Amino acid sequence: MKKATIQLETLTCPSCVLKIESAAKALDGVAKESVKVLFNSGKVKLDFDEKKLSVEDIEKAIAALGYEVKKSQAK
Amino acid sequence: MQRFILGKKNHITLISAILIATGFTSALVFKNETVAAWALVIASVLGAAPIAIQAYQALKVKVVSIDVLVTIAVAGAFFIKNFEESAIVTFLFLFGAFLEQRTLNKTRSAIKELTEMAPESALKQMENREFEEVDVDEVDVGDILLVKTGAKIPVDGTVLSGEGSVNEASITGESLPVSKEKGSAVFAGTILDNGTIQIAADRVGEDTTFGKIIELVEEAQDSKSEAERFIDRFSKYYTPAVLLIGIIVWIFSRNLELAITILVLGCPGALVIGVPVSNVAGIGNGARNGVLLKGSEVIGDFSRLDTVAFDKTGTLTVGNPSVSEKAYYGDHIEEALGYLASVERQSDHPLAKAVLEEIGDATFSPVENTEVVKGGGITATVDGHRIAVGNVALMEREGVIISGQTKADIDRFEKNGCSLVLTSVNGELKVLMGVRDQVRPGVKEDLSRLRKLGVKNLVMLSGDNQGTVDAVSRELGLTEAHGNMLPEDKSAYIKKLIDEKKQIVAFVGDGVNDSPSLALAHIGVAMGSGTDVAIETSDVVLMNSDFSRLPHALGLAKATARNMKQNIFIAVGVVLFLLASVFFSEWMNMSIGMLVHEASILVVILNGMRLLRYKLRKKPAKQLQ
């Protein structure tokens, strides 16, 4: 299990949080309870299984919703 | 494609504005209805695209968001060929979102300033012993780093070589430079004002004190209060309910225009954004002013505060006792002071430190047969004389006779809040000293500000003797003061206040030995100079142990709670007003409804922004007397 922190552009609508949250939870290999989307700081924090997917996969899923990923970190 | 359209939202807004302007000019000036209709049709389709995509994404995760309501309304308007309405509504919605993003960034600016202080790069020693610039994420514990003048210290670490002075304002709020040399601890996010140092990384990234502060503030902004969770649940059912009402109205009235107007008017825009905005601005103001408020739950409790319980030493007082009164008896005082200093020099008791400071220069003699008497003091032999240093009980044990005059002095010192240090030489009392901890400067004014902010009871809980406690209490005008309390007595007392007297209680302490009380009180306020324990166990942290931030923290919490209520009131009021006007007036339509909505969103954001500038008004001291 690795811990990822993904910095997004500014989030403006609280429903964005729900969208990103469900998109991340839907990915295979992401620990569902660990997904946390911080509305004000525009950060996504989650634990994931590096054997099943990479941070890039998670970034892609978020970007597909139309949210720009600025920076990410996994350890 | 989705990404492309969403990415170009601002361009679309601009083009749509131009098209609408073209449409109206050609209709009103050139009387060309065809061009006008086409311009508005294109504007509608273009503007509706990003909104529809967002709506689709929301529906995919089973959320009926505002985008869904607007998309249906616009489609309806399009269907009844009211292109004017569909174009204007989409434009206003997009333009509103643009302004919202801009202003929201302002409310978050205080936190951003904080996170931007985070170090980004470091000069790391590589295998070839050369220093190379790397991203701060690549630094691991144990790495050796070079920090040059003007640079940010990238990690928490220990100085290996070199010296310099560091501005630690980002951690402590104190901007006076602190000098560092070999062995000193340095903190991430602080700035090396001058000098060059090499440091070993002890903690990196989110584990550093600075990283913890940022994480805490970021989580605090997003923590939700009871009221906010209620609004969340409410919005979950609210938007579907509006949609349902729209459909019902349409079925019964067969008036599509009315139905889609209701969809637009019912949008909960200001409601979902109003409370988070107040929250983020309030917490941001705190972060800027050395007050960490951990979330909106804390703000809610704090704003309804009845009682503040204080620890004494280090909180209300400086925590650095000094000799405030003394008396000498008999001859050979100079020698007695020399013996006293010699004995005290070997002790690490806080009173001993105060006594030594008072005596200053003295001739030290070798000390033999030192014996520590528990709860009494010290006995020893110096130059062949038997010396006893301690309290009255020790003197009685030593058989020292205390005269009437001495007794009167002792009573007076104790009444003034002193702890006593008596010294006897060969069974004869020579020196009596009263040691007292000074009240922090400005505490009295701060306490009266707390009272003005509506705090009813100020209580002091201390482990010191009741005499000392009473003296400090009299000086500060506290409601109650209790001495001789162990940490568990303090927490039991707080439990009693909460359970029996039903009060909202805050406890202010240093966060180390008072953690049970900090945890038990509704609001634990830690006087922390950025220490981990204080940051983790408490609800509110006063940076740099600055007591004067407490009234600001309380005032800010109250202002933030008030601001949230105002925003909820504005948001609910606007929706009620709009829905009422659509039924009872002629002039209400979709465009005006959308305009009012977007305006109300800006109003709640601007209202929240006021908190960034919040400052506790300082009334001139003269008016208090």
Image: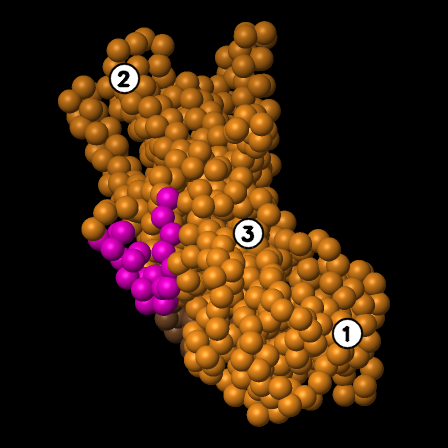
Chain colours: A brown, B orange
At horizontal 75% and vertical 79% (from top left) the residue drawn is B363
Please, what is the three-letter code of the amino acid marked with disc 1? Glu
Q: Chain of mark 3?
A: B
Specify the label residue B181 is tagged with: 1
Specify the label residue B568 is tagged with: none
The quarter of the displayed image where residue B149 is located: bottom right
Same-chain status of marks 2 and 1? yes
Along the polypeptide, which appears first: circle 2 or circle 1?
A: 1
Compared with B3, B339 (above or below) is below
Same-chain status of marks 1 and 3? yes
Tell whether position B107 is magenta.
Answer: no
Q: What whole-number distance in Å separates the C-alpha atoms at marks 2 and 1?
A: 71 Å
Q: Position of residue B528 (x, y in %)?
A: 53, 60
Mark 2 vs mark 3: in front:
3
Please, what is the three-letter code of the amino acid marked with disc 3? Val
- Residue furthest toward the bottom? B369
Same-chain status of marks 2 and 3? yes
Element marked by disc 1: loop
At horizontal 64% and vertical 90% (from top left) the residue drawn is B384
Please, what is the three-letter code of the amino acid marked with disc 2? Ala
At horizontal 48% and vertical 38% (from top left) the residue drawn is B448
Magenta-drawn segment: B479-499
Question: Which residue position is annotated with label 2?
Answer: B580
Q: Chain of mark 2?
A: B
Mark 2 vs mark 1: in front:
1
Q: Is residue B301 visible from the viewing direction of this image?
A: no
Quick one: B290 or B22, which is closer to the camera?
B290
